[in-house]
Amino acid sequence: MTLLGKFLAMLIFILSAAFMVLALAVNASHRNWRDVVLAPSTGLKAKVEVATRTNEQLRADAQRTRGALDREQAARRTALAALQTQLDQIDQVLRASEASVQQLEAKNTELSQLDRSRAEELQRLTEETRKLREQIRSEQEDRDTLFAETLQMTDQMNRLRGIVQQQSERNQQLLAQVSRYREVVDMKGIDINEPLDGAPPDRNGTILVVDRPRNLVEVSIGFDDGLRDGHLLDITRAGQYIGKAKIRRTEPNRAVAEILKDYETATIREGDRVDTSY
């Protein structure tokens, strides 16, 4: 026998052993499937029936649960609709509240500005009140001072009234004396305008006529102005001294004077000014 034959014989022997073991295993695991299916309590048919009844019961329970769920969903939808309505109402109330809050905030801002302006106005009025109080205090002090001065001036006025009364009485007495003196002077023929020392009164006038050959001039003031024979006159032109003249004859409103050659510094002309001189 060749090596190949030995190998094949060995392979056949091994396969025969394997098939024998497999047959034994199949025989050992063989079951009666009818008994398995139709067994009263443990058979597959009984299990299927139990499972069918359980399934129907579960379907009924599911149907009841679905009905209850539908009713619960309807109730919940109704409740949700009611809640949505309440939510809409609350939302409207909230919007109205927000609008009211905005109005209140605007009013609060306006009131704050008004309060600030009133506070500033109050501060200004307080400052003005303080100044007015100080001014009133100062004016009261001035009034008291003026009142004291008024009292003093009233006392002085009363004293002055007494003095005025005395002076009035004295004036009446002096007027009576002056009237008496005037009567005496008029009766005696005394000119009260005539200077007591013979000096002329302070008068001025102009030269009316110049009589060069006789060295005389006629002036516009006379006896009524207080001029008397012998009085001297200063002659000026535009404020410059040009000579002197001496009264020789007087009339009520004019006089004739002699030009004094020793004092003449320029030619005397009509219109030159004359002033009384001592």
Image: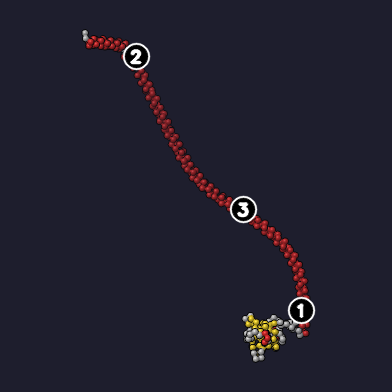
115 and 2: which one is in front?
2
Observer-side mark, 3 or 2, equals 3
Asked whether, in this view, residue 26 is left or right of residue 119, the answer is left
Tell me if residue 143 comes above or below residue 82 in the rendering.
below
Residue 176 placed where, x, y %?
77, 78
Mark 3 packing: few (<14 Cα in 10 Å), some, or many (20+)? few
**Amino acid type of the residue tagged 3 in the rendering:** Thr
First in residue order: circle 3 vs circle 2:
2
Tell me if residue 62 comes above or below residue 241 in the rendering.
above
26 and 65: which one is in front?
26
Tell me if residue 86 comes above or below residue 136 in the rendering.
above
Please tell me which residue is depicted at 77% across the width and 74% down the height of the picture.
170
**Residue under numbered circle 2:** 39
**Residue under numbered circle 1:** 178
Name the quarter where the C terminus is drawn. Answer: bottom right
C-alpha gap between disc 3 and disc 2: 115 Å
First in residue order: circle 1 vs circle 2:
2
Mark 1 packing: few (<14 Cα in 10 Å), some, or many (20+)? few
